[in-house]
Image (spheres, grey):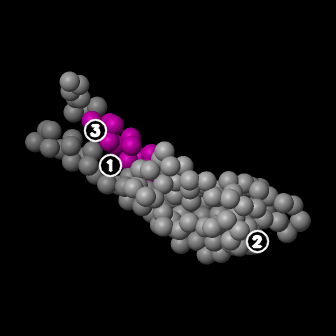
Amino acid sequence: MFDMSLELQVFMWFALGAACLLSGNTLRNKYQRLTRNGKLATGIVNGVIDDSWLKIFGDNGIYHHSIRFITADKRWISKSYISLLDDLEKRYSEGESIDVIYNPADPEEFIVGSSPNSLGPIVFMLIGLGLIMYSIWILLSGYI
């Protein structure tokens, strides 16, 4: 059986927590930037792909939505959108009309929804904070 040293456990949990915290913060900044500077367009869900092999959340797997919309300068954008980080419960149907906020400089960077109030980034940040606190607790309990 593999016995991890105290330092390795602390490092592992701290690194995982820092990665979650950084990822959540990056996603939150992306949402805020697109909400402030992005342009609104109406898109259509072309298809929904269920990655059933990724059923890490029970029935809530990761769903890829193929989204198609037209930009203000009349360019068609069609791209896959992963909705795990936006809302685990929110699944769009094929053919459904949705609001899209896109980056005018790079229209392939977009978020779904006219006013995203995503909990995904906040949840990632809270998990990261919890893992960092857990690593500190492991460290302190190992030396006390």
Between the residue at mark 1 and the residue at mark 2, the CA separation in whole angstroms equals: 39 Å
Which residue matches tag 1? 132
Q: Give the range drawn in magenta.
A: 9-22
Q: Element at badge 1?
A: helix
Which residue matches tag 3? 10
Determine the residue positioned at 87% across, 61% down: 75
- Point out the residue furthest to the bottom here: 115
Give the quadrant of residue 142. Answer: top left
Q: Secondary structure of the magenta portion, mostly?
A: helix
- Of labels 3 and 2, the one closer to you: 2
Q: In the image, residue 40 lies at what x, y percent?
A: 74, 72
Mark 2 surroundings within 10 Å by alpha-carbon count, few (fewer than 14), some (14 through 19), many (20 or more) = some
Determine the residue positioned at 63% across, 71% down: 113
Q: In the image, residue 24 lies at what x, y percent?
A: 49, 56
Q: Specify whether 106 is left or right of 55.
A: right
Q: Does the magenta stretch include residue 15?
A: yes
Task: Please name the amino acid that badge 2 sits on.
Answer: Ala
Assign the C terminus to one quadrant of the image.
top left
Assign the N terminus to one quadrant of the image.
top left
Mark 3 surroundings within 10 Å by alpha-carbon count, few (fewer than 14), some (14 through 19), many (20 or more) = many
Q: Which of 120/83 is in front?
A: 83
Between the residue at mark 1 and the residue at mark 3, the CA separation in whole angstroms equals: 9 Å
Above/below status of 11 relative to 73: above
Determine the residue positioned at 45% across, 63% down: 122
Residue 25 shows in the view:
no
Task: Please name the amino acid that badge 3 sits on.
Answer: Val
Which comes before the other along the chain, label 1 or label 3?
3
Which residue matches tag 2? 41
Which comes before the other along the chain, label 1 or label 2?
2
